[in-house]
Amino acid sequence: MLVYLSKRFLMTMLVIAVTSGIAFLLVHLSGDPAAAMAGEGASEADIEAVRATYGFDRPLYVQYLDWVGRILTGDLGRSTYLRADVTDVLARHVPVTATLGLCALTFALALSIPLGVIAALRPNTLIDRFALWVAVAGQALPSFLFALGLMYLFGVYFRLLPISGNETWWHFIMPSIALGYYATPAIMRLTRSGMLDVMQSDHVRTARAYGLAPWRVVVRHGLRHAIIPVVSLAAVQLGFMLGGSIVIETIFSLKGIGYLAWESIQRADIEVIQAILLVIAAAYAVLTLLADLLNAALDPRIRIS
Amino acid sequence: MNNMTTSAQDGAPVSLSPGRIALRRAFRHGGFWIGGTIILAIILIAIFAPLLTPYDPSVQSLSKGFVPPVWAKDGSWLHPLGTDNLGRDYLARLLYGARISLGLALLTVIISGTIGTAMGITAGYWGGWPDMIINFFITVRLTLPVVLVALVVVALIGSSLWLLILVIGLLLWDRFAIVVRSATQQLAQREYITSARAIGSSTPRILFREILPNITGPLVVVASIEIAHAILLEAALSFLGLGVQPPDVSWGLMVAEAKAQLLFRPWMIAIPGAALVLLIFAINLVGDALRDVTTPEGKA
Amino acid sequence: MLREGVKFHDGTDFDAQDVAYTLNHVADPDSDMKSRVLVDWIDNVEVVDSHKVRIHAKRPTPAALQYLTGTSPIYPSGHYEDAPVVPGSDGAERRDWGAVQPVCTGPYKLADYVAGESLTLEANPDYFDGSPKGKPSIGTLVYKTIKDPETQVAEVVTGGVDWIWGVPPENAEMLASMGNLTVVSAPTMRMSFLSLDAAGRTGETPMTDLKVRQAIAHAINREAIAENLVGDGSMVQKSMCAPVQFGCDTDVKQYAYDPEKAKALLAEAGYPDGFSVPFHAYRDRAYSEAVLNDLRAVGIETDLQFLQWRALRPKIVDDQVQIGHLTFGSNGILDVSASTSYYFEGSSDDYARDEEVKAWLEEADRTTDQERRKELYSKALNKIADQAYYIPLFMYGRTYAFNKDLDYPVTPDEMAHFYLAKWK
């Protein structure tokens, strides 16, 4: 177990290290950061001045090592546009996205697990078919269309919910639904197939034979086992949501890291872009690690291997 | 029976003629029919677009901008779906837009499918350190958020159609690699493969004659997922202004351009939006049907 | 001479020391000042008495007053001492001058500022009497950034915000018809034009041929683009400068929309079947598309390269842009030296590289005799038009939508002057 853990940890660190290199290259190899920072209408001299001030005239590998060196001391760099330390900027934006991601995941789980369980308990009935169609149809709707539709309906037409910003919990309702529904089909399917398997297994049959209440069988003996792969998937989906919330955050003007990333790309605020890529990669890596550990904790069979 | 279906996507059906059985099952599957018909219709529309409309989708007429569609007041059959802000016929754009949306998705999947399959087979067949390295690549790829990376590249290098295809193709190979890897792993341990090795069949022969044909099932399923994924990704990039560039037109671009009219001329976003949803819905239906028929016992 | 009795928001008096301090600071090349044209002319600033300064210029600078009254404020002496020290290049340290919260003298003072998100302004009760701006009327203003233009419109329609700008002109009428909003358009100083590679910086291309350049000018229906597409507040741009700028001579050669003539000129130049050319643009794709459509109609096929500014800019510098659809706002400076001189004095943005034009403009920029300046600028602008080096297209408009109960005078300088706003 300890060997497995340390191996996984080393792997995670290595992945993050490689990702940092990719993030750096992506940002530096395309376009001229100095031109972007000097802005439109800047003359050549303006741009040269910016280049020298921020050290863009040095060889790439020197800039990279400089950056990595600073990261290792806990300094993520400085936003040239926002004129603040990236750490502080992220500290303001990460909670927003984290809240959004968790709300979206909660929404997705609350919708998909019951649907999946019901579908599995009544396989090939109308309910099962209906759930499947909902899943297929749901997955076909691009999240930005869904988001715009929600905004039009609940924001403008009925005027029930606030349209943009992240000041109150009300502000999170529409973005969470728009972001979360996309994960529901996958989770629902996995719950359904897991439940189908488990309900046919010996111990569930035994439990039924002993005359335990049906819902107890479903929850205690069925769902508990069927949920294991769902946990992994949920963690991975949460990672995707953190990375994929750009469009949703832009539409609802939610000041999370997706919004920050898109703004920073347009402002060529390169240290922020690099830091966000790195943070998302790290979050994803840690989430998958957590998912594995949770799996191991929930399923004794994995622990042995 | 259960030994070959350990998890959802691994189960390659290995019976005597898997292709034929799958096909026969597919034709009895309702979703396959509905989805297939819709996709076929859209492909035909894309191919025969020039015959279906007299208009060139990129020719503008600035004085005739924002003509409403035929069912609205002031609409006429001259422009059944109206015109956009530059006075271009909306129906023509919709018909021609199918070309780019479909073509882009197909090309990206060819790129990502080739990369992913090659990596998956390598990792699954040889195992050992090639497997470890490829696994590492897959993990690195998964940690990079697709939309964000695509945005950075396209925003900075510029957004030509070919660059877009390349970028999306280079980003979406992970699922191919994962699925092909586990399918190959299972196959590689089968008796007929080990015996083929024993009698000295060449490696390319084993890979192309024995392994590749037997993983087409999961491959096709993943391809359907990734085609839908590519279309959605292009639409999302277009939405942020960095997708397909004019004079080319895609459905994603049409949605993006119409978004300013959401409150004022909602049909402009509803028309390409519905087309997009219909296409992806159909692809998903077919993908689901294929998954059903290639994995036994109706497990999803 | 400085006005007396003006106080900074922190309560200190505004005097000559502050002016000298601020200007000397921003004139320093290390000041991280982004628009160097505004300060590069300053050699040093000397305090004469408590309310009088003398600015020593490096050379005669006729547009100096324009530069001084632009967008760079005066801060109290010692203001920049609070600038944080941050890591610079090569492990060295640098000061982040811009990170200091501004302390100014204006009608509103900064109450709260979250970079990239919002700005809260409060009326300055001690604002000096007799200011040309007048006393502020609204107590507190919150300026929020909402990225998506559709979300902005949705917010202003539902009353979530009271004022937005940059409304798509085609929606102006429908927004106005909703009843709770005032929708107004105003002209701006931002010009939209084509830069053609007359100098042959990208190599021997059709652009070096005067007839081809004139054909392009004749091919584009500028009126239709300005009226039907860019909409209210826009107008055709006649010369390579903003009409409100000093020295902007608009009475230069005009190329009427005439596709037949364009085709004839192309044939004369040896391109009877047209040619194909990369076309670079970075702002407002629909406008670029309209230009492309007109070019295609006369046989010029274009390959649109729509880029972010940061990606286009290096291409311009590296001689790679045959046709660029560019825009320029002159940094709000009401003098031709900010627009025409910017593009035609041999910098990397200059794709004409006409020595004669350059000489005229340089002389005009250094001369204090205003009549002589006008004459020189006019000469330069006429030659630019005759040679069709750059094709001026249209001036941008800007459309504002705000709460009906708000009285907000719209100004033609593309700036938001909130101190003029009042509740009805």
Image (cartoon, grey):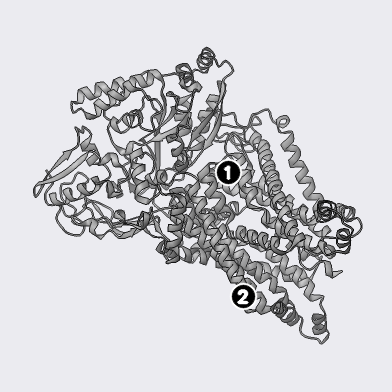
Q: Report helix, strand or loop for mark 2.
A: helix
> Which amino acid type is shown beneath numbered disc 2?
Leu
How many residues crowd around disc 1 within 10 Å: few (fewer than 14), some, or many (20 or more)? many
Q: Is residue B174 left or right of residue C77?
A: right
Query: In the orientation shown, which residue stands out farthest toward the bottom?
Result: A210
Residue C408 appears in which quarter of the rendering? top left
- Give me the chain letter of mark 2: A
Q: Are marks 2 and 1 on the same chain?
A: no
Image location (x, y in percent) of residue B248: 61, 36
Residue that protrudes farthest toward the left in the picture: C49
C304 sits left or right of B45 in the view: left
Q: Type of residue at label 1?
A: Gly
Q: Quadrant of residue A220?
A: bottom right
Most foreground residue, C9 or A148 = C9
Q: Quadrant of residue A205?
A: bottom right
Q: Position of residue A6 (x, y in %)?
A: 60, 74
Disc 2: which residue: A5
Question: What quarter of the picture does the N terminus of chain C occupy?
Answer: top left
Q: Quickly name the residue at label 1.
A: B243
Of residue B44 and residue B171, the one placed in the foreground of this image is B171
The chain that hosts pointer 1 is B
